[in-house]
Amino acid sequence: NGGRSGGGGGGGGSSSALSLLGALDVRRMDLICNRGPADFEGRVTEVANADLDWSNTIFHTMMGNPLVTAMLKERFGKRPQWADSVIADVCRKAAALPGKQFHVCEEIKRFMADECEFKNEHADGGFDDHLDFCAEFAARYYPGCSPNVLLLHSVCGVGTNLFPMDFAKLPLLEALLTPHEFLHVQSFPALQRLLFVGLLKELRDAQAARGGLGGLRGVTFTAYHGAPLALEGGDLWEHLNYQLIHILDFLPLQQWPSFTGDPAVRIFVQLHQLLREEGRLLAGVSAERLRAVPALAPDGGLPTWEHLSAGMGGLKAGMAAEVYAHQLKHLSSLIHHDLSFELQWG
């Protein structure tokens, strides 16, 4: 994978990952250094970001629902103030890692600058910060993948109904990518939404009913722009790993047990568990540091959905997740996006 588009990993760049600090904030650098999230309770203070203008963020299309608005402001409307020990640990680990691994090719860089619109912020920085983080993580920890997929994962639509690229420009995008990359870039926004509204639940139900997903051939669905798509065989598992990397950028910094209703926490815990149980955790995303949070898993194990959902949150958490899923269904109806999908077996 990578073909015409280039831009993969493989050394080069500055002498250590410390060169990324600044371009990537402490939170994202910690994820790069440790390959996954942690609960920083007692080591970070989150303060309200009074300067944040929600109308300029990717979330402005979702601010009409009071419960969703409260959830978004609680999660993304704060600035972290890190303990010196966290910053020191990130710097120490970054100094021991190789420098920048992802280098976008000039053709894609020009396409993103000239043909796409990424003005909206990500609440904690520019849109490009989010894209750079996802691509850099993939280049370091997802062997055999194309980091270009995560660099471009939003061009065909954002989960909040923003569209950085006019769909009339799809042929220009296709010309920059391999067919494999183009399939995953087209698929990304629709698959992301489907995971939240039913696909992940259906995969887990099928796993339980069939004793595993060894017979799963793929999934068919509809892209945001109406094209029928299919992710088959290894493509589906590859894509679910792209989605897992992406969700890292939306996880809480602390007090994980209080966020059982948070949609990103729910997706991360369930998807990570599904991939590792099926032997398909390919992207090197680690949940090891969450073993230190007893409420997330029994006996210092990795987080499991069964333990997390049974122990905390209850009805309120479930209702919050349902409201968020309902909001996503409403957003799909506004763009006439078909949310149906079908798992293929055999």
Image (tube, helix red, strand yellow):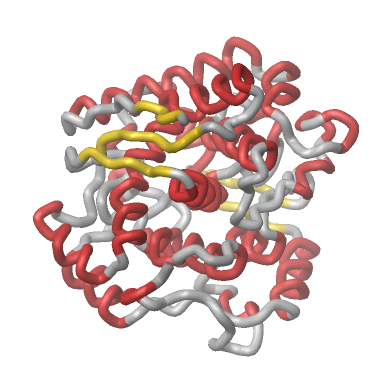
Q: Residue at x 41, y 30 (%)?
A: 344
Which residue occupies the foreground of this view, 185 or 161?
185
Which residue occupies the foreground of this view, 336 or 142?
142
- The answer to whether residue 231 is above or below residue 114 is above
Residue most extreme to the right: 299
Residue most extreme to the left: 168
Q: Residue at x 18, y 42 (%)?
A: 225
User: Does residue 53 appear left or right of residue 214 in this picture?
Assistant: left
From the top left corner, tell me how far across and down residue 257 is, in percent.
Answer: 71, 30
From the top left corner, tell me how far across and down residue 42 is, in percent.
Answer: 79, 46
- The answer to whether residue 187 is above or below residue 314 is below
User: Does residue 122 appear left or right of residue 49 in this picture?
Assistant: left
From the top left corner, tell me how far across and down residue 108 is, in percent.
Answer: 29, 74
Q: Is residue 303 visible?
A: yes
Q: Residue at x 45, y 65 (%)?
A: 146
Q: Residue at x 25, y 29 (%)?
A: 332
Residue most extreme to the top: 315
Residue most extreme to the front: 346
User: Does residue 337 appear left or right of residue 143 in this picture?
Assistant: left
